Amino acid sequence: MSVHVVLHEPEIPANTGNIARTCAGTNAHLHLIHPLGFSTDDRMLKRAGCDYWPKVSVHHHDNLDELMEAYPDGEFYAIETTGAVSYTEKDFSRADRDYFFVFGKETKGLPPEVLDHFNGRCLVIPQTTNVRSLNLSNTAAVLVYEAMRQQDFVSLLEPAADEAAVPPK
């Protein structure tokens, strides 16, 4: 199936553009939960991912419930600095599953009412106390590539939007 990046009410267009670029380069899906803190036509968003935006599988949703109802068999994980389990402890190796990594606003993370959806499925990327959090686009890339690594990068063998995909080396 697929790896999915879910941005819950993102605020910074450059982060979304960089994540879109990662999604285009990995055949991951990008889900945007509204409201957005910018327009997807925003100049900064286009500058960060302009060449890749048409090649990204982008899905818009009014809320997280709508997304979760659309994928009842999906495995959803919140990614938060308060997570109790390291992302490296999870098994994402089943290529027949849809894995969803849900990220909150850059300034506030996921609100408590959204975190309630995850029942212990809240993951963390270990870090020092030197920073409040890692950059959102870097964090998304870490999770996407970890899931792909565990699946031997099979998603890179899928055809790209308008050309043959480049197989992993």
Image (cartoon, grey):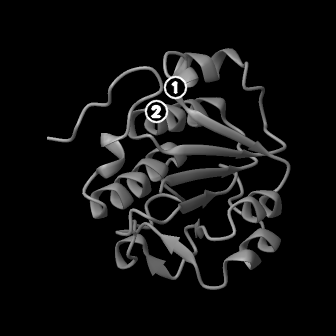
Q: Nearer the viewer, residue 70 or 122?
A: 70
Inspect the image, locate mark 2, and give the three-letter code of the amino acid beneath it.
Answer: Ala
Query: Which of pointers 2 and 1 lies earlier in the amino acid sequence?
Result: 2
Q: Is residue 84 above or below residue 131?
A: below
* Residue matched to label 1: 55
Label 2: few (<14), some or many (≥20) within 10 Å? Answer: many
* Residue matched to label 2: 24
Q: Nearer the viewer, residue 133 or 157?
A: 157
Q: Position of residue 72 (x, y in %)?
A: 69, 69
Check the picture and name the quadrant holding the C terminus. top left
Q: Quadrant of residue 96?
A: bottom left
Instruction: Name the residue at 78% across, 26% down.
Output: 39
Instruction: Name the residue at 50% across, 43% down.
Output: 137
Q: Position of residue 112 (x, y in %)?
A: 78, 73
Q: Is residue 122 above or below residue 52?
A: below
Taking the view exactly as shown, the residue that stands out farthest to the left is 169
Relative to 20, 119 lies left or right: right
Relative to 94, 149 lies left or right: left
Q: Position of residue 56 (x, y in %)?
A: 55, 31
Marks 2 and 1, how far apart in space? 6 Å
Q: Nearer the viewer, residue 29 or 14?
A: 29
Disc on res. 74: none
Inspect the image, locate mark 1, and give the three-letter code of the amino acid beneath it.
Answer: Lys
Label 1: few (<14), some or many (≥20) within 10 Å? Answer: some
